[in-house]
Amino acid sequence: MTQSAPRFAVVGGGLAGLMTVIKIAERGHPVDVFSVVPVKRSHSVCAQGGINAAVNIKGENDSPEIHFYDTVKGGDFLAHQPLCKGMAYAAPGLVYLLDRMGVPFSRTPEGNLDFRRFGGTLHHRTAFAGASTGQQLLYALDEQVRRYEVEGLVRKHEGFEFLGPVLAGPGGPCVGLVALDLKTMEITAHRFDAVVMATGGPGLVFGRSTNSMINTGSAASSCYQAGVKYANGEFIQIHPTAIPGEDKLRLMSESARGEGGRVWVPRKKGDTRDPREIPEEERWYFLEEKYPRFGNLVPRDIGAREIYDVCVNKGMGIGGQMMVYLDLTHKPREFLDHRLGAILEIYEKFAGDDPRTVPMKIFPAVHYSMGGLWVDYERTADGFIDGDSPKNHMTNIPGLYAAGECEYQYHGANRLGANALLSCIYSGTLAGPAAVNYASGLERLANDLAEGPYERERLRWERRFDEIRRMDGPENAHKLHRELGELMIENMTIVRHNDALRRTDARLQELMERWHRIGAADTAGWTNQELPFINQLWNMLELARVMTLGALARDESRGAHYKPEFPERNDEEWLKTTIAEWTPDGPKLSYEEVDTSLVKPVARKYD
Amino acid sequence: MSQEVHLRIRRQDAPDSQPYWQDFRVPRKKGMNIISCLQEIARNPVDAAGRKVSPPVWDCSCLEEVCGACTMVINGTPRQSCSTLVDNLPEGTITLEPVAKFPVVRDLVVDRSAMFRALRDVRAWLPIDGTHDLGPGPRRAPGDVDEAYVFSRCMTCGCCMEACPNYDANDYEQFIGPAPLAQAYYFSKHPTGAMNQDERLEAVMGANGITGCGNAQNCVEVCPKEIPLTEAFARLNRQANRKWLADILGR
């Protein structure tokens, strides 16, 4: 008779979470998934354009080595190189795996997987399923997880919100978690030997973004407040092309440009003509002009900055606004429907125009966080990742792991398009086995521990929610959230100035004070959405400070972080990871070396 | 056009409590959808009579009609509240109700777990040999993939279930509903799935399977992704008949 078996929890059911679940279950271990929504509704569904893998289907001499280089260069050399290398080399096998799981990837006439162009590379490297690739990938993983669920290895806790980890003592190890049942509002503590956070990005810190409403960053922030280091928080990706909206900013995929979409503004400032009436020679294709090699497919940080320059500095945006045309009207309708149908439908439904005949009006929007929870890895002598190491994807708290957008490792200062789906899945293939190997080496399992820490944490969270329920001040949580978003969008996006960042941090602290004067608009004890939101809002404020102070300190320009006062990259002083640690007086910053042993940092050029 | 949007929302505090209606007015904005109306109410939770109320509870996530969360009955029709633009609705009061075929949790939030249960019952997955690298999957004709892709866009939103006269989540033993059946068909379109379609057909041919479909064709009318559901059922029926015959003849 063996002792009780180790128990695993994965928090979050997007691509990273589900891949982690599959890897743990495949090794025969039971695993519990906690997710605020049914996992099939996770934010991964929003990914549109595709997933990168250097399969070289077009005979362009593409290779994982070039993919690796493009990724490191795209990230302005701030990413850990062995991880990028491991990811690029694993990519073809992972895309084949997804193919075998049944993802309806678009095909070549010969029946092979088709690949299209994406930003930051000159190769056709992006596999895609129409323009709903993220949805298709998530469903494939969801189906495999369902199979394990039927077999009894996977238990889903859908409609549960992670509140915080349970640590055996200060500094760890992590021995479980506390969760809130969003239906019954019951708070419970759970015993686990390893917990993998796969909770996605923090787009809601910016109010409106391309992110889903569940992307508050709250779970990652809670881990940060429990002692996990938060790395590179200042690196926030602004996607050049989104559709404005009152409730959210909807993504217009980079694949629109990958398939030939052209960005332009009228050459004449303040030209009010219908775009269809503006002749070719009176259109300014500013990206193609400035970047003859990469054209419309420059990386996102550069694309967003150029749009800002044209619209704000030169005042040439459409209608004087931060808005440019993204034009697909020169492409045949059938081609567009086949390759981009899903995103063109979105534009049509929400903007009201048919992008097959009218150029789309688009503008930059917050899209992705390169930064996130700090995690470790173990490299081999030849620069790859040791896949058996329990250190891979472990935070500084033993037993607490992070995978996917909520961690920081793969994208440096700027993520390349179609590398997010890849890094989510790849990180799941590392985090799952790492958690299993860690737990297998434990002398005492969580089930044998005393009740103390579990009860303490449960009571702490119960008190927190009781306090929130009793809040009866004049402030409305959603209005405060809107203020937070406006503040962050104004000061923490494409262009950053130190004086504005200092003011932003002061304003954030004011918002934190005002948070205490919120009135809970709903005090019901059943399916109360206000109380979790008020808690999430606090966590967003904590993260906003990490992002802002990280940006304030970093006096250089690198990837998505651009300061006109310090327009150049400064490797001598700043080729290092920003680390934020929580203290009662705000984030404490320190820095850590980056492994750049495989590719020497060079000037990043795309012209 | 009125400067305000008038919403009438059917509310219910808990699964076993009595529903009631509440009216709200929110400032009208160009391009606004039902979600932004509800967000506005959350920022200012006051009903049309000026009384302070708890903000209505509703489900949503992606807000771009791909996650399937925000289904509700809007002016009598089941649809996604994110892609329902106020300007496209007729002038006048907009009514919001929870979908009726699933148990209400609170206000506009319903429990759609029966849909996920059905996906388990029809064995909606491909039984791959493992996640290790086994090279590419089977080659597939572009046209075949295009036909399958249409069915893989089902986001389990439940609109078809709501519109189906034969479906009721409280009576799962009668009929598992259109969406899961279409998924059972989807997997037969894949070369690997075709090899074990019989397992799925067992469920499809069960008491609450395809025979529960009365061919009312309401489902295709309301599907936000325009999935040809009834086409799938016709083909699934043929698959089931063939299997039934093969079973009788002992293959």
Image (cartoon, coloured by chain):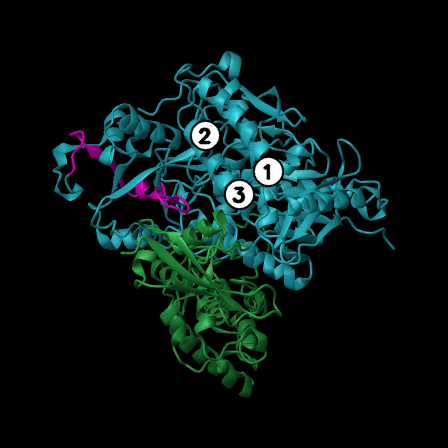
Chain colours: A cyan, B green
Most extreme residue toward the right, as rendered?
A1
Q: CA distance from mark 1 to mark 2?
A: 37 Å
Q: Magenta span covers which residues?
A: A243-272
Q: CA distance from mark 2 to mark 3?
A: 35 Å
Residue flagged by tag 3: what amino acid is it? Asn
Q: In the rendered image, which quarter is residue A588 located in?
A: top right
Image-based side of A362 in relation to A566, left or right: left
Residue A282 location in percent, x, y? 13, 33
**SS of the residue under disc 2:** loop
Residue A414 shows which numbered tag? Answer: 2
- Number of numbered labels in the structure image: 3
Residue flagged by tag 1: what amino acid is it? Arg
Which of pointers 2 and 3 indicates the residue nearer the eye? 3
Q: Chain of mark 2?
A: A
Residue flagged by tag 2: what amino acid is it? Asn
Residue A297 location in percent, x, y? 33, 34
Q: Residues within 10 Å of mark 1 (few under 14, many from 20)?
A: some
Q: In the rendered image, which quarter is residue B200 located in?
A: bottom right
Q: Chain of mark 1?
A: A
**SS of the residue under disc 3:** loop
Disc 1: which residue: A517
- Going from the N terminus, do you reach mark 1 or mark 2 first? 2
Q: CA distance from mark 1 to mark 3?
A: 9 Å
Comparing B139 with B51, the one in front is B51
- Going from the N terminus, do you reach mark 1 or mark 3 first? 3
Disc 3: which residue: A476
| Image height of A371 relative to A572, above or below | below
Which of pointers 1 and 2 indicates the residue nearer the eye? 1
Image-based side of A482 in relation to A32, left or right: left
Is A246 one of the magenta-colored residues? yes
Q: In the rendered image, which quarter is residue B216 located in?
A: bottom left
The residue depicted at 61 percent of the width and 65 percent of the height is B14
